Image (cartoon, coloured by chain):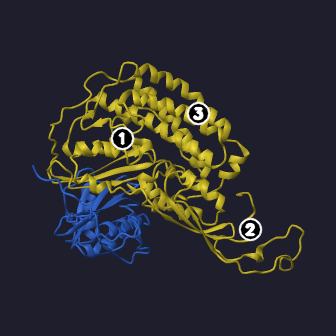
Amino acid sequence: MSDYPKNEFPTDGTGENNLENLVDPLGRNPDTVVEKIDTEEFIVNMGPQHPSTHGVCRLLLKMDGEVIVDVVPYVGYLHRSMEKIAENRTYLQYIPLTDRIDYVSAMFCNHVFCMTVEKLAQIHIPERAEYIRVIMDELNRIASHLIWLATFALDLGAITPFLYCFREREKVLDLLEMVSGQRMTFNYMRFGGVSKDLPPEFIPKTKEFVEYFKPRVDEYEYILTNNPIFLGRTKGVGILDQKTAIDYSVTGPNLRATGLKWDLRKEEPYSVYDRFEFDIPTGANSDTWDRYMVRIQEMRQANRIVEQALESLPEGEIKTKTPTVFRPPKGEVYARIESTRGEMGFYIVSDGSTKPYRLKMRTASFSNLAVLPEMSRGWKIADIVAIFASLDVIMPDVDR
Amino acid sequence: MTKEKIVNTFQNKFPEKIEEIPFVGVDVAFEVESDLILEVCRFAKETPELGFDLLACLSCVDYIDHMELVYNLFSFTHKHKIAIKVSLPRDGEIDSITPVWNAANWHEREIAELFGMTFRNHPDPRPILLPEDWDEGYPMRKDWEGKDFVRLPKK
């Protein structure tokens, strides 16, 4: 679609007929070929139950023929008012709930919540716990990107990558289950460290996985990266320029695909990320293909970090003791990490009691979804599936 | 830019309107009057030395006698971050900052719906998260009690 010369489009995406520019392949006068007719804009409802909305999101598409004039996202179908629940739970009771914010990368939600509270209460975290956190985060990043790649390819009609990705994802989930006891909602981190030490089988198994996973990424690339159908559906589609992205607070791989080399793990190192060597992949054209490529590369980098962390994993304590009745000092705090989808932050107001006075989460998907109308105007209805999927939005992360 | 420089830059532009407050996790935090918020935000974004191009977070806190809005800003070019706070009465009105950052659009819609704030000149003041037929007030307020909200007996 991107290689299509612009003036051969019957419309320019503004909803007005642009028949003056229509070039007839046989060189006839357009006025005699096509009768000038007034087309009527119409509304197409997509979702809330739609396979490619990855959850329950309703998109109202204002169409002119096959071209999208405007998109109105309707969210809130998964709103559980987690911020209100937080005000009635103790800090420790709230950790399992953070798993449900973004259930495909629950470790990050655990991590950022614990980190925010630790920052406020100035709790020291033992080095081994920090390393374990990094390993868990990066394994979870691989699992999350795999599920993204699987569903993204499936939305575009490629079924094979879906099966391949789930095969590897299951191996990652086995590793995480070995440590935390859960496949997806881990409830693993605690204030001052992690809840359990790594089991002895974990390290050899993970090393095995790291070696196993390296060629697997090439395998996905072999199927998709230069596939002409895949290129036709993604290259040049859904361009999100850097200025708009920043204006809408888009972060994470979507922002890096616009060419901005920005990653909190490098720029504002938290935990022990400053000890590892890894690259920040960026895109050049900010299109759907770039967003795909950035995530593919990120899987490789995450694998690299896991490998390094396993090699330099120190011995020692896994948790600083915190009081059973935990009362952080009075104050306000905002902390953020680089989650799979971008900047994830918690803003907590503590009044010195056992429960947070106010807790607000800044989730990446919320801002990433808000930019969808800007990206999809002027594209065809089939492209919105690709564009939406490439944003990697998780609906419970939006609605909270 | 250092903490003092950021505060000085704001203080020079808005003399006697900037009051520093404690806040963990940002370089500097200060409180401004609610009428000034649009001006302060525009100044924070458009001054090259400040260059706050990212609205990281926008939250609202209910303190029962008043409301507080917290704007977490961040600059990609200078890598510094601040928090701006405004306090206003419970049913108060405040200028929407959507003209400065489009990211504020959804955040403000959420706050308007859950806390009952009014944002002046908001381009799209529809509700966002709650069901369409919601008629039980503003659930994030501290004194809100839902229809099926049961308090556990105190032991």
Q: Which mark is residue A269?
A: 1
Q: Quadrant of residue A184?
A: top left
Which image quarter is the N terminus of chain A in?
bottom right
Amino acid of disc 2: Phe
Q: Are marks 2 and 1 on the same chain?
A: yes
Q: Which hue belongs to chain B? A: blue
B32 or A134: nearer the eye?
A134
Name the residue tied to disc 2.
A9
Element at label 1? loop
Q: Are marks 1 and 3 on the same chain?
A: yes
* Residue at mark 1: chain: A
**Residue B39 in the image: x percent, y percent?**
33, 73
* Residue at mark 3: chain: A
Picture residue at 46% right of the left edge, 39% below the top: A141
Mark 3 or mark 2: name the one nearer the start of the chain: 2
Q: Residues within 10 Å of mark 3 (few under 14, many from 20)?
A: some
